[in-house]
Image (cartoon, helix red, strand yellow):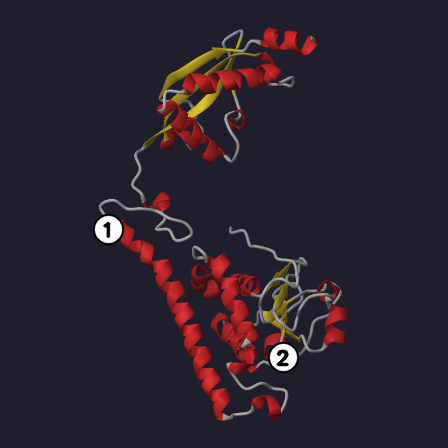
Amino acid sequence: MHAVRCRPATAGDGGALHTATDAGESLQEGEGMNRVPRETGLDVVYDGLCRFCERSLATVQRIARRPLLRLHDANDHGTIKAKFPMLADADTSNAMFVVTPRGEVFRGFFAYRRIMWESPRLYPLLPLFYAPGAGLIGPLIYAWVARHRRHFGCSLDGVAQCSVASDRVGRLDWAKGIAGALGALLLAATLAPVAQNWSPAPRDNFPFSYYPMFSAKRSDTYHVSYIVGLDAHGQRHQISHYFAGNGGFNQTRRQIDKLIRNDRATTLCQAIAGAIAREAGPPYTEVATVQIVTGAFRFADYFRANKAPLAERVRASCPVARGQWAERGSR
């Protein structure tokens, strides 16, 4: 239903937990979170000496109310390299990695985001990971937390790492304050555009949007401009938007609309006719006339397979002069 971003395990990303799968690995019969069948769940390679990391994963499991993850300590480098060769060069001491049963590898922020898809009980958290700008800001926040992860809780590798000296307590309070401020800032920036819904002249922006494309009230009909080719018998041929401009369909459609508004439909038509004249392959070899057309379509009819327009208006019509280009090519 949703495309999930797959990230290779490279040294450039930030993160503290890791997930990976190896098709040949047998089912682990460990305690708690590790008791997950091989064909389901995810393998997570993480800093096993990080109490904060351990508690974070345990919280995810409790919310899901079922085992989701097979956990592996990234500090056991020999075992990790043997079980997960795809992570041999990964910076497992700096980030978390997730490898799915299909062999997809996710790192850091994107590893946590992939984990959220494992249980319907975790779905309510997905908007935090897919909010506008989350893909840019999330990895930065994750990288900062990963670098300071042992300040968020006592480490598990000995008393020296678990000192409760006053300076450590002070750094912990400072780190919590920074993390809370960053989280509040991201949440406020995500929610701020909602106010545009009550503005007399709302303005959309990127990456923080109030999503007018989904909330705007639409008519039951829609007008769109497109390119039509006619052969010598009057048969219609749809001409690709690539002849009108660079970019995707929506971007090119806006370019066509702008040219029509500026009374330059004929200029566009002539340019497309020239490109068609130089086109050697079908289906454009039979096109004799190019037209720039604006059509009106009813949504209900169109999505019931009746794609005929309710009405059409020809903005410009140009002949395809193939002989002219043939002469130039022979010189």
Pinpoint residue 22: horizontal percent, then vertical percent.
72, 64
Outermost residue on the front side: it is 331
Q: Which residue does the numbered mark 2 point to in the structure image?
A: 48
Element assignment for label 1: helix
Outermost residue on the left side: it is 200
- Taking the spot 60% from the left edge, 86% from the top edge, the residue there is 156
Residue 295 vs 20, above or below: the answer is above
Which of disc 2 and disc 1 is earlier in sequence?
A: 2
Residue 197 vs 115, above or below: the answer is above
State the separation of the CA atoms marked 1 and 2. 49 Å
Q: Amino acid at mark 2?
A: Gly
Q: Which residue does the numbered mark 1 point to in the structure image?
A: 198
Element assignment for label 2: loop
- Taking the spot 70% from the left edge, 71% from the top edge, the residue there is 27
Q: Which residue is at the front of the view, 295 or 155?
A: 155
User: In the picture provided, is 48 more to the left or to the right than 60?
Assistant: right
Do the residues bearing badges 1 and 2 touch, measured as CB atoms within 8 Å? no
Give residue 301's quadrant in the image: top left
- Taking the spot 59% from the left edge, 71% from the top edge, the residue there is 17
Q: Amino acid at mark 1?
A: Trp
Q: Which residue is at the front of the view, 170 or 94?
A: 170
Q: Which residue is at the front of the view, 110 or 161?
A: 161
Pinpoint residue 78: horizontal percent, then vertical percent.
76, 75
* Residue 304 in view: no
